[in-house]
Every structure is written in C-alpha cells, then in structure tokens.
Image: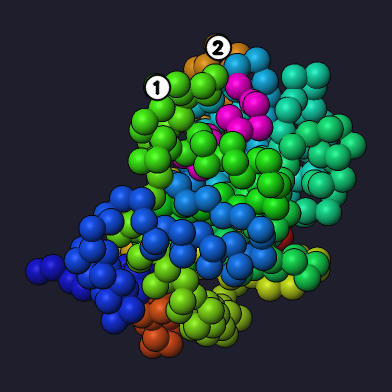
Amino acid sequence: MEIDVISLFEPECGDREIELACAVLQSAHWGDGPMLESFEQAFAGWVGRKHAVAVGSGTLGTWIALRALGIGPGDEVICSSHAWHQVAQAITLTGATPVFADINYWTGSLSPEKAALKISPRTRAILAGNTNGHPADWAPLRALADAHGLKLIEDSSEALGSRYKGQTVGTFGDVSVFDFSAPSALCTGEGGMLVTDDDDLVHELRYLRQRRIADRSSVSVGSRVPLQAGMSELTAALGLAQLAGLDERLAERKQVVAWYQEHMQSFEGVKPPYISEDVDEVHWMLYVVHLGKRFSGSARAQMIDDLLSCGIEAVAYSHPLHQQFFYMNSGDAIGRQRGQLLRDTDRISDRALALPLHTQLDEIQVKYIVTTLKDTATNVGAGAAIYL
C-alpha cells in the first residue's frame, strides 16, 4: 500500500500566481514583455541592488557572469565543491578551471583562509556561496579579492533574505546569482537572476543573455556570441507573484524552523544547523542536520531509506564536485584523492542530511520527522560525540 510522504519541498501557489500566469497566457507576449521587466525591477529593489537580469537558471546566470567578466580558457576561479545547486560547474562550461578550496566546517561556506592558499597567477575570480542559506564570511572574502585584484561572484542560489553584518545576501558580489528552481523559497520551476550595481557590467550581462526581438534586424553579432538563456513571460509572472508573498513565506518558514529547533533540543548525536556570530539572520533552504562522527556515507544512505519507509523524504545535502567522475578524471586532476586537500568538505559531505522545510508543514509533522530521525539514528548506530 502506498503511503503519503512528507515531501522535501512543496511550492506555494495561490490566487496571485494563477492570476498573473493567466494574464500572460491571454496576452500577446509570451517571451519578452512587461512581466519580465517588472520582475527584474521588483527583485532588484527587494535585494537592494541597482540592476537585475533574469536568466534561465542559476547555472546559466553564472556562465553569463563569468563571460561578461572576461573569464574563460586559461583562467582559474576559486570556489567550493560543496553545495546544493552546482553553479560552480559554470566555470567548466566557460572553459576556465575551477580550483576547489575547502570550507568552514560549521558554516559550510568557502573559507577565506583556505581560498587564499589557492590563489595563483592564473586566478581571475572567487566564486563563494551562501550555503543552504547561511551567509559566507563576506568581509574577509571581499578583502581577499580586492587585495589580489580578483572579481568576487556571490552564489545566492540557496539563500533569500539571509543577512550578514546588516546586509542582505546578494549585495556582496560584484555580481550575485540567484536560482528559482525547487527548493527555493521563491520557486518558478526553473529560472534565475543576476544582480549588480555596475552600470557597465549590466549592459554586457543583458547582451550575453539573449538576442532580443529588437536585435533581429542586425546582421552583426559582434565579437561576443550571446546565449539563448532568457526568462519567459510566464516564468517572470510566477516570479513576480512569488516575490510579492516572499516576506510572509519566509516568516512562515522560520516558524517551521523554530519547531525543528524545539524538538531537536533533546536529540543527542545529531547537530542542528549552526549560525555564526557575524550573521544577523538565516533563512535556510532546507533543514540540514549534521550527523555524528561515527556515521559514514553508507549509514546516512540507510537512514534516508528508513525515513522514506516511514513517509519522510530526506536527501544527502551535497555530493561534492571534486568527488564526481568528471572532476576526478579531468586532465589537470582537479579532484585528486578524496580527503587529501578538502578535509572539511569530505567530512561534512558524508554527514549532512537535508530534511523537509516548507510552509505546508505543521508542528505535528515536524515532531514526527524529528522523532523518526532519532529512532533511525539509534537503529543505525548513533550516540557518538558530534563536535569532533
């Protein structure tokens, strides 16, 4: 008999989404039109940046940003291999080389100190992310980038509304990238956004994004070939509707997190999410717990199967890029041996477990998730110290 499953993520759709989507379907503009422009302007205002450029996905947006910054073959970009959305793969797509640096074990974000060790004469940029919603350590990352004349790209594909030292995520990079696929709190199915304050850069971002209707009379592409990576009017309509309710949705998600935190208090052997002292507010993408040191990747996989059999969807938070076949077998041996250079990334990749987080959850369900997690952790062999 099939059982109901508490899903990892459920998008929220209301009258506003239906109304705006229907307005597009009944209009003559399904591609490039007023919804797109309205969404870009509204999102730029919400984040606090001058410009926003809507794109097909966070990965495409990062690719466009790298190209607009003149980064390509022969260049290196320092990044983390630990993330949910693998936007760092855009570095490879441009022909540049991703250079993986280790993370801060507690925050999961790129470590400025470890990134500094990877800088070479070929380094052109640093790509750092707000991992699962927790802001990276932006002050030292900016200082590092400025000291070496590097561009700083902010990956906010997992973060909406989190704040670091009084600033909202998305305001720290020379250009910042958002992604609106599940499980983002602003979900349009697919899509993303680039934001920047640079008046010159935004023109290049828009040019590289797509060749628009107004450009079709031109027979010259110029020296840079644009992509077909824009956002449709229908997607923009969903984005605009989702943005209008985003603050309320984020508040509701914080209540779900509060229920998790309350019921996690008596849970030994599993560490709830950590928040560093420089962070004002975190809006988690998913509720990610860290398993004790005696857990292995295979033990976590068994826990995921046990949770699913009890009607709870859970997943491994990250499958680091440096452990994946392409990077382990690349010509310059980007990945190399597991654990040799990225110790904290390897440690957390086996122990980070993502649990459901969305506005459809109630306290009874959250209590059930935590109780079931405790039972399966005990069955698999928990009880280890978690801070080692």
Q: Identify which residue, 265 or 54, lies in the foreground.
A: 54
Instruction: Report the residue at 76% width, 45% height from top.
Output: 111
Residue lying farthest right?
Answer: 147
- Type of secondary structure dominating the magenta stretch: helix
Q: Point out the stretch of residues depicted in magenta.
A: 60-72
Q: Which residue is mark 2?
A: 331
- Say which of marks 1 and 2 sits in front: 1
Residue 307 percent location from the top left of the image = 34, 65
In the rendered image, the quadrant that contains the N terminus is bottom left
Residue 208 percent location from the top left of the image = 50, 34
Quote the CA–CA distance across marks 1 and 2. 39 Å
Of the image marks 1 and 2, the number of the one nearer the N terminus: 1
Residue 173 percent location from the top left of the image = 71, 49
Amino acid beneath label 2? Gly
Is 192 part of what is drawn in magenta?
no
Query: As displayed, is residue 314 above or below residue 336?
Result: below
Q: In this image, 152 relative to 253: left or right?
A: right
Instruction: Report the residue at 13% width, 68% height from top.
Output: 2
Q: Which residue is mark 1?
A: 219
Q: Identify which residue, 372 or 136, lies in the foreground.
A: 136
Residue lying farthest left?
Answer: 1
Q: Identify which residue, 9 or 164, lies in the foreground.
A: 164
